[in-house]
Amino acid sequence: MPTLDGGPCGDCLKAPPAFDATCAAFLYAGTLAQLIPAAKFGARWSILPALAQLMLPALEKHPRPDLIVPLPLHPLRLKERGFNQAQEIASPLARELKVPLENACLIRTRNTEHQARLSEKARKANMRRAFSTIADLDGKHVAIVDDVMTTGTSLDAAARALKQAGASRVDAWVLARTP
């Protein structure tokens, strides 16, 4: 959760996630709470690169990663939606920050239920073994990009897989964080 000093929240101190830091450019409220679902579920994906540009000032104070990795969708979900919202945010960030974008190193191995429909406990079970890696990330600093962070369960599962592949640091970069 957001804190006044940008440090870890109480929940993260009690049960640290696999990712090392989070950068949420905005709170998921107001206009963003309308734009993101319109982009994601209304096939208006062209909104996302513009929103990614708005993330750049928030990312300036964070260490530059070696790689940017969009949170992957399962191939069936990608076929259903037609695009990956995380990819549409990550691509312009990688280009602007001049950091390599790695689309293939993290794989969604299970076609999980939509997280938004689940309780926090169910989200954790849903994400168990949902990702795998096919790359050697030995010593790399990786930033995972997604659109919205609610409980952080998806990002945590992805960070665990990246760290198992050798990543030394994994940051979660999201457009918005639920309040």
Image (cartoon, rainbow, N blue to C red):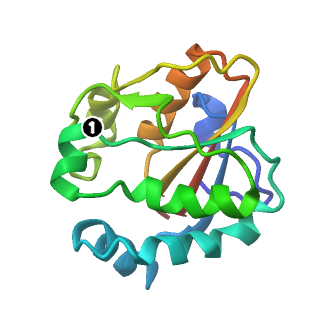
Q: Position of residue 139 (x, y in %)?
A: 76, 20
Q: Where 27 sits versus 167, above or below? A: below
Q: Is residue 24 visible?
A: no
Residue at image x 35%, y 80%? 34
Where does residue 41 sit, x and y in percent of width and height?
Answer: 23, 67
**Quadrant housing residue 18:** top right
Vertical arrangement, residue 162 with respect to residue 55, above or below: above
Q: Which one is in front, 59 or 43?
A: 43
- Residue that label 1 marks: 74
Residue 11, percent from left and from top = 58, 39
Residue drawn at the location 50% of the way across and 22% of the way down: 161
Q: Nearer the viewer, residue 120 or 165?
A: 165
Q: Residue at x 54, y 70 (%)?
A: 27
Q: Is residue 103 left or right of residue 57?
A: left
Amino acid under disc 1 = His
**Element under disc 1:** loop
Residue placed most toward the observer, 64 or 4: 64
Q: Is residue 148 left or right of residue 50?
A: left
Residue 54 is situated, as x and y percent measured from the top left of the image, at 63, 76
Residue 166 in sight from this viewpoint:
yes
- What's the residue at 30%, 66% (across, down)? 40
Query: Where on the picture, by quarter, is residue 3?
Result: bottom right
The quadrant holding residue 167 is top right
Instruction: Say few, some or many: other residues with alpha carbon within 10 Å of mark 1 (under 14 / 14 to 19 / 20 or more).
Output: some
